[in-house]
């Protein structure tokens, strides 16, 4: 089974906006699971950890996890997120399959089907 990493904005000015970012990522993660891939959704892993450690701890940790994945899905707003932009660069350097949501959903679905 291929492993897909979800990348997009997490941080936001208000707790509600952070939660909205998490929920958006969760919804997309579920859809990718339903396609047949395993999914890493960092948003849900550290949802309540804001301020518990330095941002570099999260970013370095997720870079390590990303290195174990087969693909990355860039969700809406990813270009406004420094973390997601870094994750996209790392994925590119690693040669991971990269898909932008929602424009490349069909390509992602086909990739998952080919690789399961």
Image (spheres, rainbow, N blue to C red):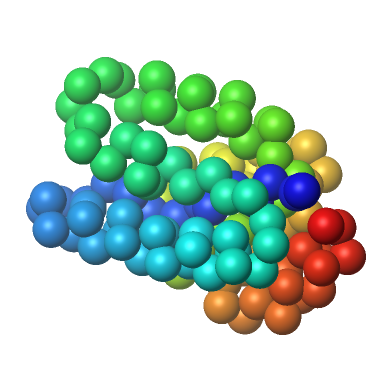
Q: Point out residue 73 in the picture as x, y percentages from the top left corner.
A: 60, 59
- Rendered image quadrant of residue 40: top right
What residue is shown at x 24% (from left), y 62% (from top)?
A: 20
Whether residue 55 sits left or right of residue 96 in the image: it is left
Q: Is residue 50 left or right of residue 8?
A: left
Give how far across and how far down residue 59 sits, in percent. 45, 29
Residue at 50 percent of width and 23 percent of height: 60
Q: Is residue 101 left or right of residue 106?
A: left
Up-down relation of residue 12 to residue 106 (above or below): above
Query: In the image, 76: left or right of 72?
Result: left
Q: Is residue 78 visible?
A: no
Residue positioned 49% across, 24% down in the render: 61
Q: Which quarter shows the C terminus?
A: bottom right
Who's the residue at 73% across and 73% down the image?
A: 109
Residue 100 lies, with reference to residue 53, above or below; the image says below
| Residue 48 visible at all | yes
Q: Residue extending furthest right? A: 114
Q: Position of residue 27 (x, y in %)?
A: 41, 67
106 in relation to 47, above or below? below
Vertically, is 108 above or below 54? below
């Amino acid at each position: 089974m291929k492993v897909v990493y979800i990348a997009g904005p997490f941080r936001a000015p208000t707790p509600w906006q952070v939660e909205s970012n998490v929920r958006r990522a969760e919804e997309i993660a579920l859809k990718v699971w339903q396609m047949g891939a395993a999914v890493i959704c960092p948003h849900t892993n550290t949802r309540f950890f804001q301020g518990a450690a330095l941002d570099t701890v999260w970013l370095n940790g997720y870079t390590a996890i990303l290195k174990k994945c087969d693909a990355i899905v860039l969700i809406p707003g990813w270009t406004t997120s420094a973390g997601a932009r870094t994750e996209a660069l790392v994925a590119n350097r690693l040669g991971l399959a990269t898909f932008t949501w929602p424009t490349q959903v069909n390509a992602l679905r086909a990739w998952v089907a080919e690789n399961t």
